[in-house]
């Protein structure tokens, strides 16, 4: 009686419009997941064992220097902005992690090494595996602090508040909005 999508007087077209309104297209990895489900995949225990390989800084740099390997940083945005590894991709573990990973990394076969908050390694590997990203090769042992303590350069993002933004837009009028359409 009260379900908006199951009104008696509703046509099929109206029903489809009601239940699909506001849905975004599926992420690029969905098709690859279908192929994985048909052809098979590694067991979760193998995926976890491989992904939970702690990498010391030298090994992390060596693996991360390979152009086929992506460095994925899942720390909170505020921490990432304070310092990150050049060339790394940020997708924060909090919030809508899986949809953003799917949008930013369309190939589920992408080899990945992780920078996580200490203690979040297992959760990160598991959440990636749940959506088909089974090729995590390990994580930076000790988290980003290990990188910061080494002599390797750190990149930063300058953040400004709304008042500073309003001042900046007067002299730099081009603004790029990178939010999702929804």
Image (cartoon, rainbow, N blue to C red):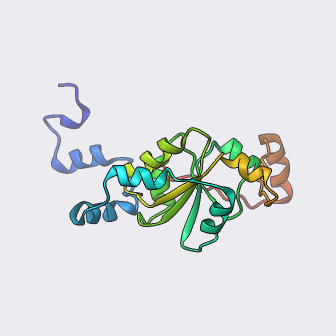
Could you say which is closer to the camera, residue 49 or residue 179? Answer: 49
Specify the quadrant that holds the N terminus. top left
At x 82%, y 58%, the residue is 151
Percent position (x, y) of residue 169?
Answer: 80, 54
Find the residue positioned furthest to the top: 1
Give the number of callouts: 0
Q: In the shown orientation, is residue 177 left or right of residue 16?
A: right
At x 81%, y 46%, the residue is 166
Indicate the quadrant where residue 50 lies: bottom left
Could you say which is closer to the camera, residue 29 or residue 144? Answer: 144
In this rendering, the answer to whether 3 lies above or below 137 is above
At x 77%, y 47%, the residue is 159
Can residue 168 be seen here? The reply is yes
Q: In the shown orientation, is residue 152 left or right of residue 137?
A: right
Can residue 96 be seen here? The reply is no
Find the residue positioned furthest to the left: 8
């Amino acid at each position: 009686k009260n379900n908006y999508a199951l009104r008696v007087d509703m046509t099929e077209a109206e029903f489809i419009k009601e239940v699909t309104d506001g849905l975004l297209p599926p992420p690029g990895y969905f098709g690859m997941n279908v192929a994985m489900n048909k052809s098979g995949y590694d067991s979760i225990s193998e995926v976890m064992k491989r992904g939970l390989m702690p990498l010391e800084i030298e090994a992390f740099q060596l693996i991360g220097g390979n152009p086929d390997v992506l460095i994925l940083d899942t720390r909170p945005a505020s921490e990432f902005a304070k310092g990150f590894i050049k060339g790394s991709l940020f997708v924060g573990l909090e919030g809508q992690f899986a949809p953003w990973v799917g949008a930013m990394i369309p190939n589920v076969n992408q080899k990945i090494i992780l920078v996580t908050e200490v203690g979040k390694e297992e959760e990160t590997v598991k959440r990636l595996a749940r959506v088909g990203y089974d090729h995590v090769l390990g994580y930076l042992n000790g988290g980003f602090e290990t990188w910061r303590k080494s002599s390797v350069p750190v990149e930063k993002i300058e953040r400004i508040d709304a008042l500073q933004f309003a001042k900046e837009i007067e002299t730099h009028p081009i603004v790029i909005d990178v939010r999702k359409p929804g």
